[in-house]
Image (tube, grey):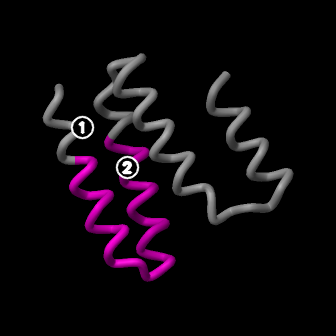
């Protein structure tokens, strides 16, 4: 339920720059609620790829650190 709603909002509003935030939010959900390490990794990689497309090296660095911290919890 979480995923379709977030992606539907982005599609309808065409605010694709927020897609990265949705990926991170979903990763946190899968970390805390579903306890799904593979999905967490997948979503962080999508967020990192999106940040790279934006040429935002600082954001890429932050996302990689956040990913490492979250994955260390498994």
Per the rendered image, the range of residues in magenta is 41-67
Report the side of 33 relative to 21 (left or right): left
* Residue 70 marker: 1
**58 versus 67 height, above or below:** below
Quarter of the rendering occupied by the C terminus: top left
Q: Where does residue 36 sit, x and y in percent of width and height? A: 34, 24
Q: Residues within 10 Å of mark 1 (few under 14, many from 20)?
A: some
Residue 58 falls inside the magenta stretch: yes
- Tell me where residue 35 sits by quadrant: top left
Q: Where does residue 59 sit, x and y in percent of width and height? A: 37, 68
Determine the CA span between mark 2 and mark 1: 10 Å
Quarter of the rendering occupied by the N terminus: top right
Report the side of 67 relative to 5 (left or right): left
* Residue 44 marker: 2
Instruction: Name the residue rendered at 50%, 47% in the picture.
Output: 23
Sequence-first tag of 2 and 1: 2
CB of mark 2 within 8 Å of CB of mark 1? Answer: yes
Q: Secondary structure at mark 1?
A: helix
Residue 35 falls inside the magenta stretch: no
**51 versus 36 height, above or below:** below
Instruction: Name the residue rendered at 26%, 47% in the picture.
Output: 67
């Amino acid at each position: 339920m979480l995923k379709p709603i977030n992606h539907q909002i982005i599609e309808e509003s065409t605010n694709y720059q927020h897609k990265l935030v949705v990926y991170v939010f979903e990763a946190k959900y899968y970390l805390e609620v579903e306890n799904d390490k593979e999905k967490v990794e997948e979503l962080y990689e999508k967020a990192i790829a999106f940040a790279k497309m934006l040429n935002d090296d600082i954001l890429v660095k932050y996302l990689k650190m956040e990913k490492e911290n979250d994955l260390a919890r498994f």
